[in-house]
């Protein structure tokens, strides 16, 4: 198993991880793990079930029981099926993001998702996108990137994404939410957001996404060619 190559791409919300990871996985012909979607799915499934977010035992049960399937049969981005329901759009809302961030601080929830995430490591390779891919889930990954961008730029990107979907959002509240989520993700005791010691940091502020994709691909290709 350890011979199956993994590229981990960790970083804060809105750093472009999702777009970059998917494109890089596509170009390499590798599998793709959107670990944030797993956390979001568990948060959403817990809300659907009316679970009280202070009831950790029920949240942990939800983490074990929630069935998440990525349907890649269409031409567009994968659809995320949560307990049989297509939740792709609902998963992207700030509400789902906040639920994910809240459950992500519970170490037993993280432990429940460990094997589910490692199961994505299949031939010919995996691009794993998240917060702790290089530090906790795949510490032995051959390639590790920490992708970041300024909070202002991340808020602008999220604003434009949501606006394009016809969702009404306010820029200043988005920026506040992003800063609050960053602080929570970086300060939590379990698997805090930080670059792995052997990760290469790529700051995408002001960089067009194509350039970021090429940069990450060239990191992989350079290392593979050695
Ligand atoms: O990447 P994202 O915005 O979809 O992630 C949603 C939340 O899930 C984020 O606030 C932190 C959490 N998360 C995590 O703790 N570990 C991961 N590997 C991925 C996401």
Image (tube, rainbow, N blue to C red):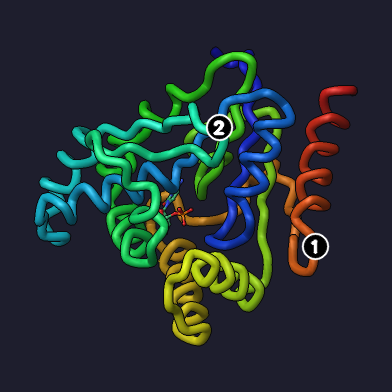
Q: Looking at the image, tell me whether mark 1 or mark 2 is earlier in sequence order.
A: 2
Q: Residue at x 53, y 41 (%)?
A: 77
Q: Nearer the viewer, residue 188 or 172?
A: 172
- In the rendered image, which residue does mark 1 sit on? 207
- Residue 174 screen position, x and y as percent: 48, 78
If the image is split into quadrants, where does the C terminus sit? top right
Task: Report the residue at 37% width, 26% height from top.
Answer: 115
- Left or right for 225, reference 199: right
Residue 173 - label? none
Badge 2 density bin: few <14, some 14–19, many ≥20, Cα 10 Å: many
- The foreground one among 112 and 160 is 160
**Residue 44 location (% of width, % of height):** 25, 52
Please report the residue visible at 56 percent of the width from the left and 34 percent of the height from the top. Answer: 75
> In what quadrant of the picture does the N terminus appear?
top right
Residue 65: x and y in percent read 19, 33
Q: Secondary structure at mark 1?
A: loop
Q: Which residue has dot 2 on it?
A: 32
x then y, percent, for residue 116: 36, 28
User: What's the CA distance linking mark 1 and mark 2?
Assistant: 23 Å
């Amino acid at each position: 198993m350890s011979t199956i190559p993994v590229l981990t791409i960790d970083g804060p919300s809105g750093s472009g991880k999702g777009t970059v990871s998917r494109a890089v996985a596509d170009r390499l012909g590798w599998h793709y793990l959107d670990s944030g979607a797993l956390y979001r799915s568990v948060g959403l499934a817990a809300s659907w079930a009316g679970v009280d977010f202070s009831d950790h035992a029920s949240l942990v049960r939800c983490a074990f029981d929630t069935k998440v399937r990525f349907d890649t049969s269409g031409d567009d981005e994968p659809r995320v099926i949560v307990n049989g329901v297509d939740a792709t759009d609902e998963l992207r809302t700030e509400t789902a993001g906040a639920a994910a961030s809240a459950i992500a601080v519970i170490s037993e929830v993280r432990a429940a998702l460990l094997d589910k995430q490692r199961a994505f490591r299949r031939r010919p390779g995996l691009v794993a996108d998240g917060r702790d891919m290089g530090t906790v889930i795949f510490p032995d990954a051959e390639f590790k990137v920490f992708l970041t961008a300024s909070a202002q730029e991340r808020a602008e990107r999220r604003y434009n994404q949501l606006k394009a979907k016809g969702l009404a959002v306010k820029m200043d509240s988005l920026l506040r939410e992003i800063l609050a989520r960053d602080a929570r993700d970086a300060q939590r005791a379990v698997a805090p957001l930080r670059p792995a010691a052997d990760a290469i940091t790529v700051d995408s502020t002001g960089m067009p996404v194509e350039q970021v994709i090429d940069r990450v691909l060239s990191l992989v290709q350079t290392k593979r060619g050695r």
